[in-house]
Image (spheres, grey):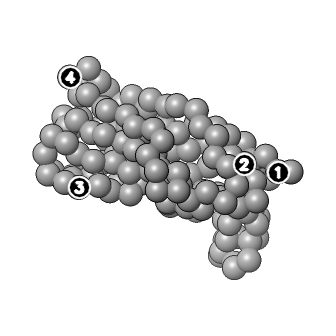
Amino acid sequence: MALLGGGVGGAGNPVGGSFTGPAQALEIIGDLGYAYSGAVGVGAGDVTMLSFTTGNYTFTGRVYTGYCAQSNITDDMTFGVFLNGGLISARYLDTSKEGNTINFNYHTIVIPPYTEVRVACSNISSTTDRDMACIMTGEIIRG
């Protein structure tokens, strides 16, 4: 089915809410919101996994972070959640404790209306790209 402009919930299709692939944006379907970064290569430096600005609603849900690979789970990583440029949460993924597993750890979050959101990841063990992912799921509260 061809995708048409002006769809529902930012999905860009006439059905509204059909998954169209990984993106940095928050997708909204009725009272639910989700963002899937997909596999993002993270080597040296700060790599943005998700980046969006909320609208006239509050988002309450979970932020999941971890490896998006079936092998090469070898490097330690850090994840940061930023609201309006300020770091509000960080996670250190220690492969000596989480190695050879695909653990998606999460924390709960409440994001107010009109807030710039960014989730970033850094490889602190090497400059080799490793496939990492961030998933955000939750409820959209209006009014």
Q: Earlier in the sequence, mark 1 or mark 3?
A: 3
Q: Residue furthest right?
A: 143
Does the rendering let one see residue 50? Answer: no
The one nearer the camera, 23 or 4, is 23
Q: Residues within 10 Å of mark 1 (few under 14, many from 20)?
A: few
Residue bearing the label numbered 2: 58
* Residue bearing the label numbered 4: 96
Decide: marks 2, 3 in contact (CB < 8 A)? no
3 w.r.t. 126: above or below: below
Q: Name the spot of residue 138 as percent of width and height, x first.
A: 66, 41
Q: At 75% across and 53% down in the image, what residue appears?
A: 57
Residue type (three-letter) at the residue carrying disc 2: Thr
Q: Which residue is mark 3?
A: 45
The x and y percentages for residue 54 are 65, 58
The answer to whether residue 83 is left or right of residue 47 is right
Residue 78 in view in this figure: yes
What's the residue type where badge 1 is placed?
A: Arg
